[in-house]
Amino acid sequence: MPEEFFELLSDSQTPPTYKFFNGSAWVSGASGPPAGEAGKTTPVISPIDQSVVGNLTTATTAEIDEIVIKLKSAQPAWEAKPLNQRVKIMHLVADWVHHYEEYLTTLLVREIGKSVGESKSEIVRTAELTDYFADEVQSIHGETINSDDFPGYDKGITAMVERVAHGVVLCIAPFNYPVNLAASKIVPALLMGNTVLFKPPTQGGISGVHLARIFEKAGVPPDVFACVTGGGNEIGDYLVSHKNIDAVAFTGSSDTGVAIAGKAPMKPLLFECGGNNPAIVFPDADLNLTAREIVKGGFSYAGQRCTAIKYVLGTKGVLDTLIPVVLAQMKELIHVGDPRSPETKLVGPVISPDVAQKIQGWIDESVGLGAKVEVGGKHDKAYIEPTILINVTPTMPVIVNEVFGPVVSFIEVPGMGDAATIINQTRFGLQACVFTKDEGTGIVYAKSLNVGTVQINGSPQRGPDHFPFLGVKHSGIGVQGVRYSLEAMSRLKPVVLNKPQ
Ligand code: G3P
C-alpha cells in the first residue's frame, strides 16, 4: 500500500506537513538555530487551483551542518563497497519507482500541474533511467597508460588511471521534472561512490521527498543519502557554499546557475540551465512535419521544458506559408485544460499565477515594441493561452528572456546566415533544430550554430537519455547523459608507477 510505504513522511494532517530525511530518520526540523526560524514551513501550492498540496519543512543551518558532516564521514566506506552492491540497490530503486507509478503520477499532476500522460512518462522514464545507469556503470573501467608513447620518454613509467568519487555531491532538482531530474543526478552520484545531499525544488518538493523515501527503502545505507527541504532563497546559498560539499549538480534557471557558480568556487559543477531554443526553417522543409514539431516542441508541458522551442526563424516566404499550418496543427494537437483531465493535451497551467503574470508582462512589452499576437496572448490565473507571436525581433523581451510558458515567437530573417547570427548572439546555447529535406544542408548548417546539440527535422529534447546532453554559454556546464553523467560524477585519479629499466 502506498499509504503505508510513505506514511512516515508527513504528520498526516490536512494539508500534510512533510518531514525531511537527515540520512537516517525523517525529521520535522525544529531542533536547532534557524536558517530562517526553527520549524519553519513553506506551503506547496497546486498550479491547478491554488490549493495547498502540503507544507515542506525548512531545514536549519545546524541541521544541514550535522547532515553534511555525516555524509562526509560515510563516503569512504560507501565508495569502498563492491560496485555490484551499489548496482543492486539502484535496481531496487527502479523497481520501487515502477511499483508506485500510479501514486507518484497522481502526486506529480497535482503538485506541478503536468498532464497525466506527461507525469506518467516522467515516472516510467525515471525507473528506466535508473536501471540503465546501474547497467552502464559496470562498463566504466580505469586504464593504464605507458610513458614511451610520448617523445623523450622510455618505457618504465606507467599511469594507472582510476575513476574515484568527488565526495559529497549536492543535487538540486527543478520543478519541471522533480523526480526525473533528481534521479538523473542522485543515481550516477551514488553509483560512482559519492554520498548525496538532495535538495528538491519547493514545487515538486513533495514528489522529491517521496523519491527520497524510495532511496532509503531500497537499502542505501544510513548517512549515504539525505534530502533537505526549504526554499532556495532560504537554504540554497548555505548549501552551495558549504565547505563540506565537494561538487554541485543543478538544473534550473541561468540566473540561478550563474549565482551558484559564483558561490561554489573551484568545485566540480554539472549544470543544466536555461534554454531559448530556436527552430530554423529552410525553404525546402516539409512544412507539415515542421509545424507538428514546432507545436509539440513549443507547447508540451505548457512550454516549461528547457528544451522547448521558443522561437522560429525563416524568410518571409517560408513563414507566410508555415504559420497557417502551425495554427491548424495547434487546433488539432492542443487542448488547454486541467491537467487531471484526459481531454487535456499539451497545455495545462504554468507553475504559478505569478509566473503567468511575469510572462504576460513580456508578451505585452513585446507587443508594445511591434510584435503581433497571432493567437492567444492572455492568461487567467496560472493558465496562459497557447500563444503565437509574429513580427518579433531578437531584442524583444520574449526572446532575450527564457519564457518558461506556452509562447512561440516567429522572427523573419533575410537569409539563413542571419538566423545563425541571431542565435549565436543570445546568451543561451542549449539546443537548436533545423528543418530541411536535405540532411546534408542541415549537417553543414549545424556547424555554424554555437549550441549544445542541433536536431535535424525534430524538435529539441534531452532524450534518448544515453545521448550527451549539454548547454553552452549560459545554458550549462558539463555533459549529462547516462555515461557522461557517471563520468561527471567522478574524477580521474592516476597513480604513477616509476620503474626505470
Ligand atoms: O527542462 C528540462 C530538460 O532536461 C528537458 O528535458 O526530456 O523534456 O527534453 P526533455
Image: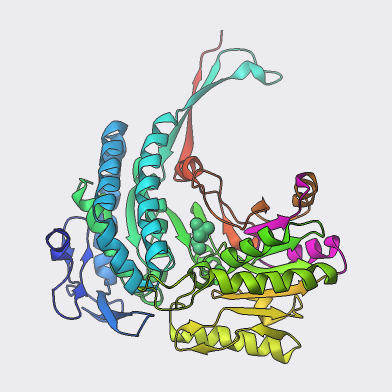
- Residue 273 rendering spot, x and y as whole percentages: 54, 63
Q: Is residue 159 above or below residue 186?
A: above
Q: Relative to the observer, which residue lies in front, 60 or 177?
A: 177
Q: Quarter of the image containing the N terminus?
A: bottom left
Q: Is residue 178 visible?
A: no
Q: Is residue 140 magenta?
A: no
- Residue 92 rendering spot, x and y as whole percentages: 25, 43
Residue 398 horizontal side relative to residue 5, left or right:
right
Q: Residue at x 22, y 57 (%)?
A: 213
Q: Relative to the observer, which residue lies in front, 418 or 426?
A: 418
- Residue 250 rendering spot, x and y as whole percentages: 46, 60
In this view, which residue lies farthest toward the bottom? 368
Question: Which quadrant holds residue 363?
Answer: bottom right
Residue 283 horizontal side relative to residue 121, left or right:
right
Q: Is residue 428 visible?
A: yes
Q: Is residue 238 above or below residue 92?
A: below
Q: Relative to the observer, which residue lies in front, 486 or 420?
A: 420
Q: Residue at x 28, y 62 (%)?
A: 104
Q: Quarter of the image containing the C terminus?
A: top right
Q: Relative to the observer, which residue lies in front, 242 or 250?
A: 250
Q: Is residue 43 above or below residue 466?
A: below
Residue 56 horizontal side relative to residue 26, left or right:
right
Q: How did the renderer colour the structure?
A: rainbow
Q: Is residue 42 above or below residue 475?
A: below
- Residue 475 rendering spot, x and y as whole percentages: 60, 61
Q: Residue at x 49, y 51 (%)?
A: 268
Q: Residue at x 78, y 70 (%)?
A: 321
- The residue stretch that appears in magenta: 414-439
Q: Is residue 415 magenta?
A: yes
In this view, which residue lies farthest toward the top? 501
